[in-house]
Image: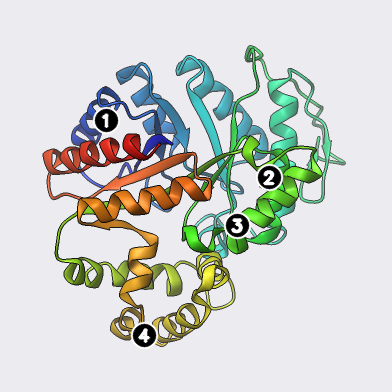
Amino acid sequence: MRVAIQLTADAGPWDELVGYVVEAEAMGVEVCWVAEAWGTDAATPIGYLAARTSTVLLGSGIFQVGARSAALTAMTALTLQRITNGRFLLGLGVSGPQVMEGLHGVSFAKPLSRLKDTVAVLRKAEAGERIEHDGSTLTLPLPGGEGKALRLSQPIPETPIPLYVASLSPKMLSYTGEVANGWIGTSFVPEGAESAYWKHLRAGAEKAGRKLADLDLCQGAEVAFGDDLEAMTTERKMGLAFSLGGMGSGNTNFYNSAYARAGYEDVAAESQRRWLAGDRAGAAEVIPDEMVLATTLIGPEEHVRERLQCWSESGITTVRLYPAGDTLSDRLDTLGRAIDLVRAVS
């Protein structure tokens, strides 16, 4: 398995975050994904990190489709591919209605169609073609106006930019398997991966004449070392409850649905019910220790090693680590120990 990290650019002093990425590169980390949710954007940090690193791949994890026009997404991707000297990975995702409609004022209707339209525009742009498109969410040029089809003035890249899609729902997973170079996953339980993810990704890959093994399957989790498993699981239940109840609305929560498909349907439903009713403590209380341990890489070193072995055997090809620690030094120490374990099981 490759080792990746994820950077949230508003999660601490910027100089410290840059130092973390630089040190991680020196330790052998191969990919750094830069997050974009409702804080910082992903493109700006990647541009800065391109000048401070030399080997690590830098990915948008993820650009939110709908927050940018399709053409601007293509322009930004091509720009970052140039200034990283070919080290850029384009991660796209549709986000959810709370962010799209609440923050960006963009309808969340037809998210898969919007993603397909964006990818179509991207492929025309990087091929140096005039961008004409007639899709279900986008028509270029805009009909009835004065616009005309334009070709981006940027140089054509020698190879297409690697495309990764962050997907959770079955239809989105199938599309990922059909068109993407890789999958950016979350809410992952290796024991439930076949029903939650693999069968949908595989169906899409086979539709395009490919195999599941043709995709880079990138999955992430917190990693922390310690012997007190009871304390470690208890303090992480609130974060998991937030994913089940707060990362979406009562009608649309892709994380909740993914955990349900992985075998935790009853827990996911009850935790969400309590969260939406305002009972945050109760939402965390119903989550069993076993579910926390199934979805993280925490505990004694041997236990973390065993879980990484499960990830590898399930098909994960890139492990995205979120190392715990109160200080930069602590996080780097945790990361170093985790890297050694990944190498031991790969």
Q: Name the residue under label 1.
A: 24
Of the numbered discs 2 and 4, the one sitting upstream in the chain is 2
Q: Residues under labels 3 and 4: Cα distance?
A: 30 Å
Q: Can residue 115 be seen in this view?
A: no
Query: Badges 2 and 4: C-beta atoms under 8 Å apart?
Result: no
On screen, 187 above or below 174? below
Quadrant of the drawing holding the C terminus: top left
Q: Residues within 10 Å of mark 2 (few under 14, many from 20)?
A: many
Q: Mark 4 points at which residue?
A: 278
Q: Which mark is residue 197?
A: 3
Residue kind at label 4, given as amino acid type = Gly
Of the numbered discs 2 and 3, the one sitting upstream in the chain is 2
Coordinates of residue 53 in the picture (x, y in percent): 32, 20
Q: How crowded is mark 3: few (under 14 residues within 10 Å), some or many (20 or more)?
A: many
Q: Is residue 65 visible?
A: yes
Report the front residue among 156 and 148: 156
Residue kind at label 2, given as amino acid type = Gly
Circle nearer the viewer, 3 or 4: 3
Residue drawn at (17%, 70%), measured in percent from left and top?
231
Q: Mark 2 points at which residue?
A: 177
Residue drawn at (20%, 32%), measured in percent from left and top?
15
